[in-house]
Image: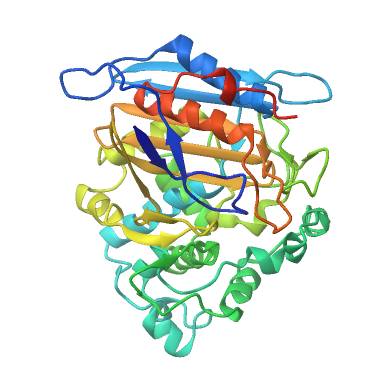
C-alpha cells in the first residue's frame, strides 16, 4: 500500500509539498474498516528511527478512538544534550493557515465577509484595480488567486542558497503591507480562479489584513480570542517577540547543505510570516484543534463543508496537492485525513486527522531542509525522508514499523 502524503518540508521553503509514504503489510482492521488500536512499541521504534536517521529531535502525539500515545526521541539542544519531550512548544509554520481560514469563515457566518466577493471591495488600497475586482476571498483561501509567494523576494539569498537573508532578518520587524507588495509586484502565477492554484503565503497575509479590516481588531488578536481560546487551546499563541515562551527545542536549519553544521534559528522575529505561519503550539493542542474543527465545534458544518471543497494546487516543490480553504485533503488506504503541515527556519510540523475524528497524528522535528542538492541543484533523498515515511505510515495506518534500512544514521 502507498499513502500519498503532503509533507516534504525539507524541500519546501515555507509551505507544503507531497511525498509518498511506503507502508508495510495491511494493518489489522476493526469492524469499521479502520486500523485497530495503537501499537505503542512500533510508534516509539519509528520515532527513534527518525532520530537515528539524522534529526536531532522528534516528538509526536497519536490518538485513536479516545486512546492517546505521545513520545519523543533525541535532543532539543545538540550542544547540551537536553532531551526533547512530547509536550514541547513548536513553531508550527503554515498550520497557522487553518486558524486564519477558520477566523475568516466565522466572519462569513456573521455576514461580514462573502467568500465570492472581490478582495478589492474590502482592501482596495492593497489590491487595487482589475486585480482587486477579479480575485475573490475564496481564491485567497484556496490559493487560486494567481498572486505569487513573497518569501523568495523577502529572503533573496535563498536562491543561492545562502543564509545571509536569514541572518539579516532575524530581528527585523516586517509590516504585512510590505510583504504583500513584494508578492503583488512579482509576475502572476496564473489567472485568478484558474483550475489549478499555486501555493502562496501572500494570500494569507492578505486574509489577515481582511480580518483586521472587517473586525476592527488586529488579526492575531481576533484569532486568539475567537479560534484559539474557543477551541480550548492552552499552549497555542502568536509570539509577541523573537523568543518562544515555555519549554521548546532549538530549531536547526540546514538550508539544503548551505548551513553546515545546521544552525539554530529558534530565536526569530516571526513578523515575516504573520497570519500565514507564525503560530507556536504543541502536538496536543494541534490534535485538540483539528478534532474540534472536524466535529463542527469551531465553525458550522456548512462552513466546514466549504473548507473541504478542494482544488488542485501546485505546492512549492512542484507537486500537486488537494487544497481546500486552509485545509489539505490526504487520501490513504486507511481513510481520508484532513489537516496541514508547516515549516519555518529549523522547525517542521504536520497534523492530520481522519475525517471521522477517531485517528490523529501530530509530529514535530527540529531540523529542516536536510536534503543536499546534486550537480543540477535537485535536492537528493536522505535517510530522514524514509524514516519519516515509516513514522507517518505507523501513526496514521498502523503500518510501516521502522526498518533498519530506513532508520540508518544520516550523518
Residue that protrudes farthest toward the left in the picture: 31
In the figure, is residue 294 to the left or right of 6? left
Residue 6, position in %: x, y? 45, 45
Compared with residue 198, is residue 187 higher up or lower down, i.e. above or below?
below
Residue drawn at point x = 52 percent, y = 15 percent: 44
Residue that protrudes farthest toward the top in the picture: 41
Scheme of colours in the image: rainbow
Residue that protrudes farthest toward the front in the picture: 375
In the figure, is residue 220 to the left or right of 80? left
Rendering quarter of residue 28:
top left
Residue 3 or residue 306, whichever sits in front: 3
Residue 323, position in %: x, y? 37, 55
In the figure, is residue 210 to the left or right of 278? left
Residue drawn at point x = 58 percent, y = 23 percent: 405
Residue 8 or residue 124, whichever sits in front: 8
Compared with residue 289, is residue 406 higher up or lower down, i.e. above or below?
above
Residue drawn at point x = 37 percent, y = 21 percent: 398
Residue 82, position in %: x, y? 75, 19
Residue 58 or residue 280, whichever sits in front: 58
Rendering quarter of residue 117:
bottom left
Residue drawn at point x = 73 percent, y = 48 percent: 255
For the question of whether residue 234 can be seen, the reply is no
In the figure, is residue 369 to the left or right of 184? right
Residue 105, position in %: x, y? 33, 57
Q: Can you say which quadrant of the picture contains the C terminus?
A: top right
Residue 119 or residue 84, whichever sits in front: 84
Q: Can you say which quadrant of the picture contains the N terminus?
A: top left
Compared with residue 271, is residue 357 higher up or lower down, i.e. above or below?
above
Compared with residue 343, is residue 378 higher up or lower down, i.e. above or below?
below
For the question of whether residue 103 can be seen, the reply is yes
Amino acid at each position: 500500500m502507498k499513502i500519498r502524503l503532503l509533507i516534504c518540508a525539507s524541500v519546501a521553503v515555507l509551505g507544503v509539498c507531497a511525498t509518498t509514504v511506503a507502508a508495510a503489510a495491511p494493518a489489522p482492521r476493526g469492524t469499521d474498516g479502520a486500523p485497530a488500536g495503537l501499537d505503542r512499541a512500533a510508534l516509539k521504534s519509528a520515532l527513534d528511527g527518525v532520530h537515528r536517521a539524522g534529526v536531532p529531535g522528534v516528538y509526536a502525539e497519536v490518538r485513536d478512538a479516545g486512546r492517546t500515545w505521545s513520545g519523543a526521541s533525541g535532543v532539543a539542544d545538540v550542544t547540551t544534550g537536553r532531551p526533547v519531550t512530547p509536550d514541547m512548544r513548536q513553531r508550527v509554520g503554515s498550520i497557522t493557515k487553518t486558524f486564519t481560514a477558520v477566523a475568516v469563515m466565522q466572519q462569513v457566518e456573521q455576514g461580514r465577509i462573502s467568500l465570492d466577493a472581490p478582495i478589492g471591495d474590502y482592501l482596495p488600497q492593497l489590491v487595487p484595480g482589475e486585480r482587486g475586482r477579479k480575485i475573490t476571498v475564496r481564491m485567497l483561501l484556496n490559493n487560486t488567486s494567481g498572486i505569487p509567494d513573497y518569501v523568495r523576494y523577502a529572503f533573496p539569498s535563498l536562491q543561492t542558497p545562502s543564509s545571509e537573508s536569514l541572518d539579516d532578518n532575524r530581528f527585523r520587524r516586517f509590516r504585512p503591507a510590505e510583504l504583500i507588495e513584494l508578492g503583488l509586484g512579482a509576475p502572476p502565477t496564473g489567472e485568478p480562479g484558474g483550475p489549478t492554484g499555486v501555493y502562496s503565503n501572500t494570500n494569507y497575509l492578505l486574509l489577515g489584513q481582511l480580518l483586521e479590516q472587517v473586525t476592527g481588531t488586529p488579526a492575531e488578536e481576533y484569532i486568539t480570542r475567537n479560534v484559539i481560546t474557543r477551541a480550548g487551546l492552552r499552549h497555542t499563541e502568536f509570539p509577541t517577540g523573537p523568543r518562544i515562551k515555555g519549554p521548546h527545542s532549538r530549531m536547526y536549519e540546514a538550508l539544503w547543505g548551505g548551513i553546515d553544521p545546521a544552525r539554530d534559528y529558534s530565536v526569530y522575529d516571526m513578523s515575516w510570516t504573520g497570519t500565514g505561519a507564525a503560530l507556536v503550539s504543541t502536538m496536543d493542542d494541534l490534535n485538540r484543534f483539528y478534532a474540534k474543527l472536524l466535529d463542527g465545534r469551531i465553525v458550522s458544518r456548512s462552513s466546514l463543508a466549504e473548507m473541504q471543497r478542494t482544488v488542485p494546487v501546485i505546492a512549492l516543490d512542484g507537486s500537486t496537492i488537494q487544497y481546500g480553504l486552509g485545509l489539505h485533503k490526504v487520501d490513504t488506504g486507511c481513510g481520508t485525513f484532513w489537516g496541514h503541515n508547516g515549516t519555518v527556519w529549523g522547525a517542521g510540523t504536520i497534523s492530520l486527522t481522519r475525517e471521522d475524528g477517531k485517528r490523529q497524528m501530530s509530529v514535530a522535528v527540529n531540523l529542516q531542509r536536510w536534503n543536499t542538492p546534486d550537480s543540477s541543484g535537485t535536492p537528493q533523498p536522505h535517510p530522514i525522508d524514509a524514516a519519516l515515511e515509516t513514522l507517518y505510515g505507523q501513526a496514521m495506518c498502523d503500518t510501516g514499523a521502522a526498518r533498519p534500512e530506513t532508520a540508518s544514521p544520516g550523518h
